[in-house]
Image (cartoon, rainbow, N blue to C red):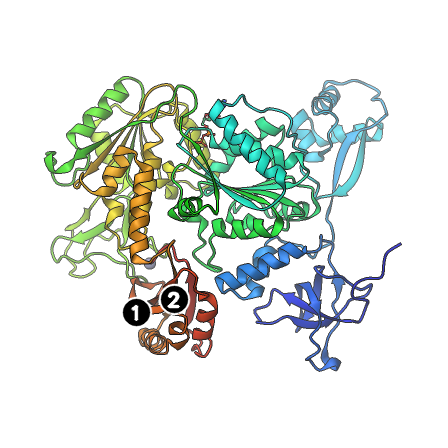
């Protein structure tokens, strides 16, 4: 007995569609009626598009022209907290609602009929003859406790041809059934597989469990040195959440980390969770999206966009490595998944755990201010100790030109590899050399589409633009003066470090870990596992190695250029360098053998370098906080970046100047605008870029002022205006 639908067939309804229009459209309710939050298929011009019932219709269209929605889709309706989340996130990031809906429906075939597949399970019949092949099929079925398999899976697991299986179906030993493809994920059991926690870990886990059990919103900063067992501890919060019958989401900053994490979840809960990231197949994405909405997925592990999945009852969001820059989406919808996680949780009465060894200043300050709870894990698990830290004063080292490994670092590496241990040389620069210069005329080879130098990648034998990805062969002659044979590589990249290391340590096995050297996440994972198992003596890596991987044999970390990150004009330069180098140093000595981290620097007295060496993290944050407070910048003030871009340089500057001149709506709230100025990278993909920066005091309603400010300006067709709230990068 169905109750009367909220909107009976033919009533006017307001539908939010994925089409780029800045309003909710009126339709008539489809046959059978519909309810608030239902996913619909609606006609849009000659096409059919996806929409969500957003409320009653406005009635401001010509009633004769309002079309009828085609049908309600077979998907769990969008719940009120999710609709609010999209609305609030759109307001915060100044993103049009249709773009938010697109983010929330990024799975293929949501409108399609549920697709079916044929599966095989044990039947009651007997086989007439027990051949070896048939026995293997029965053994495989027994081994998996009577699970159902597809034809392909079963023939592979049992090692038999498909005709053997079909034959067993005829005899009734197996039965063939059609089931929906989007099946629920295996149940996770929160009651099994927990590790014995240390007293410090137990303390933290107990607190998190109690907070989750409270069933109300709150955020906890879980700060723990690398290797202290943060993951073990927050898995206990996940367990408490699952035990309540609610769903949990764990966000990781890097797909390469998911494999290790999935293994740990399986050990803890007896089955793998659902996955959501760019490496997941389309069919699996669709399954994940639908099952999350129906409650058929208890735990999702994913990248930042997993935050927009339609959870039925979300009780916990963990943001692991919460300081990581990759949580900020830098194109399309500009949002920070860490901040949006807090917003979403507050609307779902869920808890948030922000885990990091080196929290962002934002989260540290929120904990200081009492807005977040804070838990600390101070000791590494087991025998592992924090590494010894030391500086190598490069002013005192003798180094020929074109070499970057100081004699002191060289000796330290030699000692480690002689002892059968591993050393990591860290340099946050991909490729062979950052600059290719002509020794005849001084010309530096740049990208044709960007104001960026091309970076030589010797493994690929090409020059690559790190802005737009454009590549070209390394020329023989200088493109400017035409002289041959005088092009020279200037500066180091990881590939060049590998060359230098090979010359210094001819017998060592050297592995380079850089995101561009692996075709797939799987290849990268295989390489990481091989290295962890001892497959290399010297590792050379970019920031990829800083993120959470465990290398038990690694006892020495040498930072080639500790000053590299300090040179930028970025307001977070000090914070980012501090985080990155503390993380990298934390890779050393994670097992029984103690580790050492050595920083090559030309400025050992620099306060950031000294803070990294002394490990006085609270001191560093306090000093950094005081500086930001004095400057009135985030997290003690508000900022927004405006990026204008167009193929025509004059158009962007003209609009920039006009915006700066007409800043009344900003001044009205006490906000200031700076610029326009050419962006640090003034041209990307052939588009000229100009930036303005808006600064305001903390309590200022900045978004509303920004909207009022830009609204009157008509943008020429080719000109793009992007607003970046709380910008993280300023390129
Ligand atoms: P973090 O996330 O803080 O870097 P992890 O949770 O990855 O630390 O723990 C580091 C290593 O120590 C992992 O291999 C983990 O399995 C192990 N470990 C941590 N705590 C325990 C424990 N209580 N019992 C057994 N192993 C533990
Ligand atoms: Zn380019």
Say left or right for 473 vs 23: left
User: Alpha carbon of mark 1 to alpha carbon of mark 2: how far?
Assistant: 10 Å
Q: Which of marks 1 and 2 is nearer the N terminus?
A: 2
Quadrant into which the N terminus falls = bottom right
Q: 293 above or below 156?
A: below
**Element at label 2:** strand
Q: Residue at x 83, y 28 (%)?
A: 123
Quadrant into which the C terminus falls = bottom left
Q: Which residue is drawn at 33% across and 52% down?
A: 466
In the image, 451 versus 415, the foreground residue is 415
Label 2 sits on residue = 642
- Tell me: is circle 1 under 8 Å from ligand 2: no
Sort mark 1 into few (<14), some (14-19) or many (20+) by Cα contacts within 10 Å.
Answer: some
Say left or right for 622 vs 259: left
In the image, 649 versus 611, the foreground residue is 611
Sort mark 2 into few (<14), some (14-19) or many (20+) by Cα contacts within 10 Å.
Answer: many
**Element at label 1:** strand
So how many labels did they put on this image?
2
- Report if the CB atoms under discs 1 and 2 are less than 8 Å apart: yes
The x, y position of residue 219, in whole percent, is 52, 44
- Toward the front, the furthest residue is 370
The x, y position of residue 360, in whole percent, is 39, 45
Q: Label for residue 675?
A: 1
Say left or right for 132 vs 678: right
Q: Can residue 438 be seen in this view?
A: yes
Answer with the quarter of the image where residue 497 lies: top left
Q: Label for residue 214?
A: none
Answer with the quarter of the image where residue 518 lies: top left
The x, y position of residue 334, in whole percent, is 46, 58
The x, y position of residue 475, in whole percent, is 24, 53
Q: Which residue is drawn at 12% across and 52% down?
A: 439
Q: 669 above or below 238?
A: below
């Amino acid at each position: 007995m169905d109750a009367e639908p909220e909107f009976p067939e033919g009533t006017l309804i307001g539908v939010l569609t994925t089409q780029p229009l800045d309003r909710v459209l009126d339709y008539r309710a489809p046959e059978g009626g519909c309810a608030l939050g239902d996913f619909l298929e609606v006609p849009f011009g000659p096409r059919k598009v996806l929409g969500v019932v957003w409320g009653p219709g406005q009635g401001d269209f010509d009633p004769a022209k309002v079309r009828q929605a085609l049908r309600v889709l077979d998907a769990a309706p969008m719940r009120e907290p999710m609709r609010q989340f999209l609305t609030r996130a759109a307001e915060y990031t100044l993103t049009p609602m249709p773009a938010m809906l697109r983010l929330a429906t990024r799975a293929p075939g949501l409108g399609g009929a549920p697709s079916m597949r044929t599966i095989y399970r044990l039947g009651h019949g007997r086989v007439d003859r027990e051949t070896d092949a048939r026995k293997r099929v029965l053994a495989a079925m027994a081994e998996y406790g009577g699970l159902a398999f597809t034809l392909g899976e079963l023939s592979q697991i049992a090692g038999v041809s498909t005709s053997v299986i079909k034959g067993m179906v005829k005899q009734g030993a197996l039965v063939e059934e059609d089931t929906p493809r989007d099946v629920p994920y295996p149940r996770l059991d929160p009651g099994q597989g927990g590790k014995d926690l240390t007293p410090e870990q137990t303390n933290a886990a107990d607190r998190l469990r109690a907070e989750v059990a409270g069933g109300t919103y709150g955020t906890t900063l879980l700060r723990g040195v690398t290797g202290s067992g943060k993951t073990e501890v927050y898995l206990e919060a996940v367990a408490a959440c699952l035990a309540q019958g609610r769903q949990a989401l764990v966000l990781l900053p890097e797909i390469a980390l998911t494999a290790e994490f999935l293994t740990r979840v399986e050990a803890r809960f007896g089955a793998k969770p659902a996955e959501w990231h760019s490496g997941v197949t389309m069919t699996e994405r669709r399954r994940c999206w639908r099952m999350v909405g129906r409650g058929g997925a208890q735990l999702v592990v994913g990248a930042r966009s997993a935050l927009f999945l339609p959870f039925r009852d979300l009780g916990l969001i963990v943001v692991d490595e919460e300081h990581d820059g990759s949580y900020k989406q830098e194109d399309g919808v500009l949002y920070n998944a860490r901040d949006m996680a807090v917003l979403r949780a507050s609307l779902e009465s869920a808890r948030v755990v922000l885990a990091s060894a080196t929290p962002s200043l934002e989260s540290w300050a929120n904990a200081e201010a009492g807005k977040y709870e804070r838990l600390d894990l101070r000791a590494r698990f087991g025998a592992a100790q924090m590494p010894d830290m030391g500086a190598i004063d490069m002013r005192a080292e003798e180094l020929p030109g074109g070499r970057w490994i100081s004699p002191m670092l060289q000796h330290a590496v030699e000692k480690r590899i002689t002892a059968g241990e591993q050393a990591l040389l860290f340099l946050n620069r991909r490729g062979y050399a950052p600059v290719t210069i002509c020794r005849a005329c001084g010309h530096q080879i740049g990208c044709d589409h960007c104001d960026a130098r091309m970076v030589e990648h010797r493994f690929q034998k090409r020059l690559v633009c790190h802005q737009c990805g454009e590549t070209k062969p390394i020329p023989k002659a200088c493109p400017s003066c035409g002289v041959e044979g005088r092009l020279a590589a200037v500066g180091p990249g990881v590939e060049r470090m590998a060359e230098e290391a090979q010359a210094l340590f001819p017998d060592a096995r050297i592995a380079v870990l850089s995101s561009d050297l692996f075709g797939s996440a799987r290849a990268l994972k295989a390489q990481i596992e091989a290295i962890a198992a001892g497959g290399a003596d010297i590792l050379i890596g970019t920031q990829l190695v800083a993120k959470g991987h465990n290398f038990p044999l690694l006892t020495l970390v040498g930072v080639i250029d500790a000053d590299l990150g300090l040179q930028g004009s970025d307001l977070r330069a000090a914070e980012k360098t501090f985080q990155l180098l503390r993380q990298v140093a934390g890779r050393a000595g994670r097992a029984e053998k103690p580790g050492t981290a050595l920083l090559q620097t030309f400025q050992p007295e620099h306060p950031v370098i000294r803070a990294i060496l002394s490990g006085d993290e609270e001191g560093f944050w306090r000093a950094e906080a005081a500086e930001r407070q004095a400057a009135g910048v985030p997290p003690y003030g508000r900022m927004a970046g405006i990026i204008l871009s167009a193929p025509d340089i004059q158009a962007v500057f003209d609009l920039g100047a006009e915006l700066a001149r007409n800043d009344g709506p900003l001044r009205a709230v006490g906000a200031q605008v700076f610029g326009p100025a050419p962006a640090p990278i003034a041209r990307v993909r052939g588009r000229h870029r100009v930036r303005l920066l808006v600064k305001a005091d903390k309590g200022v309603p900045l978004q509303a002022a920004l909207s009022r400010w830009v609204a009157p300006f008509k943008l020429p067709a080719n000109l793009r205006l992007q607003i970046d709230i709380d910008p993280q990068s300023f390129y």
